[in-house]
Image: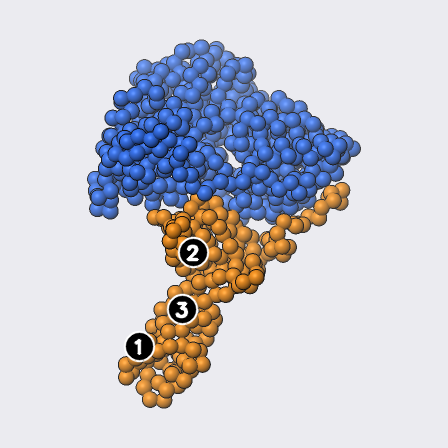
Chain colours: A orange, B blue
Amino acid sequence: MSALKIKKGSNKHSAYNLRPTFSDVIERHTLAVIVDNEPGVLARVIGLFSGRGYNIDSLTVAEVDHTGHTSRITIVTTGTPQVIEQIKAQLGRIVSVHEVHDLTVEGDSVERELALVRVHGTGDQRVEALRLSEIFRARVVDSTHESFVFELTGAPDKIDAFAELMRPLGLGRIARTGVAALSRGR
Amino acid sequence: MTRQMSGAKMVVQALRDQGVDVVFGYPGGAVLPIYDEIFQQNDIRHVLVRHEQGAVHAAEGYARSTGKPGVVLVTSGPGATNAVTGITDALLDSIPLVVLTGQVPTFMIGNDAFQEADTVGITRPCTKHNWLVSDTGDLSDTLHQAFHVATTGRPGPVVVDIPKDVQFASAEYTPPGKAKTNHYQPPVKGDIETITELVEAMETAKRPVFYTGGGVINSGNAASQLLRELVEATGIPITSTLMGLGAYPASGKNWLGMLGMHGLYEANMAMHDCDLMINIGARFDDRITGRVDAFSPNSIKAHIDIDPSSINKVIKADIPIVGDVAHVLEDLLKVWKSRGRKVNREGLQQWWAEIEDWKKVNCLAFTQEGKTIRPQHALARLEELTKGHDRYVCTEVGQHQMWAAQYLNFEDPHRWMTSGGLGTMGYGFPASIGVQMAHPDALVINVAGEASWLMNMQEMGTAMQFNLPVKQFILNNERLGMVRQWQELLHGQRYSHSWSESLPDFVKLAEAFGAKGIICTDPADLDDAIMEMINYDGPVIFDCLVEKHENCFPMIPSGEPHNKMLLGEASTEDAIGNTGAVLV
C-alpha cells in the first residue's frame, strides 16, 4: 500500500467526510428535503425510511412554494455517520426530491417545534404552573378552573424541559408538531 | 404539432414517438380501450404472454439484449400484482422498463372496485418512480417523462397507472420534444480531480484489479469499448460480476473470469490481495464481498457509479467517483494518457506472476466419466458447439446459472441475461422470448434448471404463437440444486422439500405445445443432441438429465472472506460456521 500516494481512508471531497464514515457513533441529524408536492410523495419518503430500516425521530411537512408546488419535509433522524450518508443519498435518488440539505453539517441552523401542553391543577400548583410558563414564554390558549393549555415554541429540548417541570404540577396530554428547521443567515 | 385524441390513442402515439416497436402484455377490463387502439394499427407489435410475470421478464430480456427500454401493458388488479415480481427484478438489476397498468375509473378508486388494487402503492417500493394519471391532459407528458426516468441515470422500471376513464376521455397530445420534462437529470460527468486521483493511484499500484459490473453494460456500448481500451493499454487484470459479463471479452488476455460467491479462484484471490481495486459500475453486492470486514483488507478502493447511494453503502470508497461509466472512463483515459501512460511495470509483472500461479489451480476443472452427464460437461459442450453463433444466453436461477456463468464465454455486452439481484426463478424462459423478439435470427438459449423452468412454463404458448425458436436447455437434476447444496452444507444433509417430484415428461410436454422435445441422458449422445437443438427451426425443450448430486464450486461459504474458497467436495466439512448460517 505504501506505493500508493493517497492515504487509505482519505477523502477530500467534503469536509463532512473528514470524520470516519464507518464509525459506530450514533449521531442526530436534521434534514430538510425539498420535494414536488404531488400525491404519494410523503409515502415515498416514509417508505424509504421504513423499507431500509432508518429511524425517524420527527417529521414535518407542508407546501412552502405554492407556485412551484414544492414542499419542505423536515426530518430528524439518528444513525451512524455511514447510515446518515446513506439516508441522504437514498433521499436524493427519489425522483420527486429536488434537494436534500443536512442542516446539522451545513452550518448553524434554527430548530423550532410548537407544543400544546395541558396541565391540570388547582391552588398553589396552578399558580406555580402559570409562573413557570412565563419563564418559558408559553402562552395560555385555553383555561378552565382545573386546567390550562399552554402554547409553547422552542427547540425540542426546551419543550422536554417544560414538560418535565410540569409533570409534578399535573401534566396532562401534550401535542407536538415535530421540528421545523432553517439554516441561519450567512 | 398538437392534436386532440383519446387517452388510449395517446398511449399508442406516445409509444410510437418513443421508438417502441414491441409491447409485451395481457389484456383485461381496465385496458380494453388501449387494446382497441393496438388492434387498429401496425407500427407496434404486441406479444401476448400467458402470465403477466412473463410479460415483464420478456420486456427485461428485450431491454437487456438491446439497451432500449422494455414496454409492458397489463390490466388493473391481478394484472398489476402479477407484474410485481418482474418489476422488482428489473429494479434490482437496473433494467429500464415502462410498465403501463390499467386502473379502475377515477371515480371508483378507493371503493374496492372489481379488479382494483392500489397499484402505485404496491409498486412504489419496487419502481424507480411511478405515476397515477388522473387527467387525460397530463397523460402524454407523463408517458414521455416515464421513458425519460426509466432510461436516465441509473436505469430502472417505472409504472404508469392509467384509469379507464382517463383512457376514454380526450385531450391534446403533446409530442416528446414539447412535453414538460421534470427536473430529473442526474449528472453524468465525474469529478475530474477525483479521476486524476484515481489515475495517480493506477500509476503507482503494484497489484491493481478492475472489478466491473452491470453499470458498464447499462452505460452503453461506448463504455465497453472504453473499458477494453483502458484494460489493454494498462495491462491491469479485470474481473466482473455476474451482471457485467461480456463488457470485457472472455477471450481478452487480461480476463480473470467472474468473481464472487461462485466466482473463479484467481478472480477472488486477486480481489483479496490487490492493493488498488477499481470498481466500475458494480455495487459491492453481498454475493461479491463475502465477509465485509475481511473484504480485500489491504486495498485502496476506487468506486465509479452513477448512483451516489451505491457509494459507501457497503464498502468505504477511498476514491469515490459519481458519474456515468462511459463519461468517466473517457476522462480517465484522457488524463492517464496526458500524464504519460504510466503504470508500475515491475509491480504488474510480479502481480501477473502471482495470478498465473492461482490460475494453475484450474478451479473449473472437472472430469466427465461414466454414463451420467455432469452439468459442467453439458455447458462446456454447449459452449463449444454454439460459440461461433450469433448467440444470446438467458438463465433461470440456481446452480445451472452459476455453471453457465462459469463455463460459457461472453465476448460482447448485451449477450447475457440473468436475474442477478433478485434471483428470480422463472426469469429465463420469458426473458428468452423477449430476446428472440428483438433478435429474430439469433440463437437464443435459456440455460435452465427443471424447477425454475416450470415456474413460467406457460410461456411455451407464447413462443409457439409468435414463432420464436427459443432453445430451452434444461439441466435436469430432479432437484432444487442450489437449495439442496445449501442443505448439504448447512442443514445436516436434511433435504427438506428440495427435490422435483412428479416432473412432466419434457419431450411430451414440448410436443403437447407443438414444439420439439429432445431428451439426452448419455454423454455420448450429447453433441448430436445439442446440434439437433441448434438446427431445429422452432422452440425446443432440451431435457438434459444430469448428475443429481453435483455441487457448484468454487464457493465462498457465507460469512467467509475471498481467500477462504471451497474448491471441491473435500473441503466442505464444517465449512460454514454459525454466523455464516444465518446469511443467505
Picture coordinates of residue B122 (x, y %)? 34, 43
Image: A9 above or below B525: below
Can marks 2 and 1 be said to lie on one chain? Answer: yes
Q: Mark 1 lies on which chain?
A: A
Choose the circle earlier in sequence order: 2 or 3.
Answer: 2
Helix, strand or loop for disc 1:
strand
Which amino acid type is shown beneath numbered disc 2?
A: Ile
Give the side of residue B128 with respect to residue B329, left or right. left
Which percent across, then down, holds residue A96? 42, 46
Name which residue lies at 36% across and 69% down: A175
Spatial separation of the CA atoms under disc 1 and disc 3 = 16 Å
Residue A70 rendering spot, x and y as whole percentages:
41, 51
Q: Do labels 1 and 3 share a chain?
A: yes
Q: Mark 3 points at which residue?
A: A114
Q: Name the residue under label 2.
A: A73
Residue A6 shows in this picture: yes
The kind of residue on which mark 3 rests is: Leu
Q: Farthest residue toward the front? A: B1
Which mark sits nearer the N-terminus, 1 or 3? 3
**Quarter of the view holding residue B505:** top left
- Mark 2, Cα crowd under 10 Å, few <14 / some 14-19 / many 20+, is many
Is label 2 in a helix, a strand or a loop? strand
Q: Residue at x 43, y 21 (%)?
A: B438
Mark 1 and mark 3 residues within 8 Å of each other at the beta carbon: no
- The residue that mark 1 highlights is A142
Residue B273 is left or right of residue B30, and the answer is right
Q: Which amino acid does label 1 sit on?
A: Asp
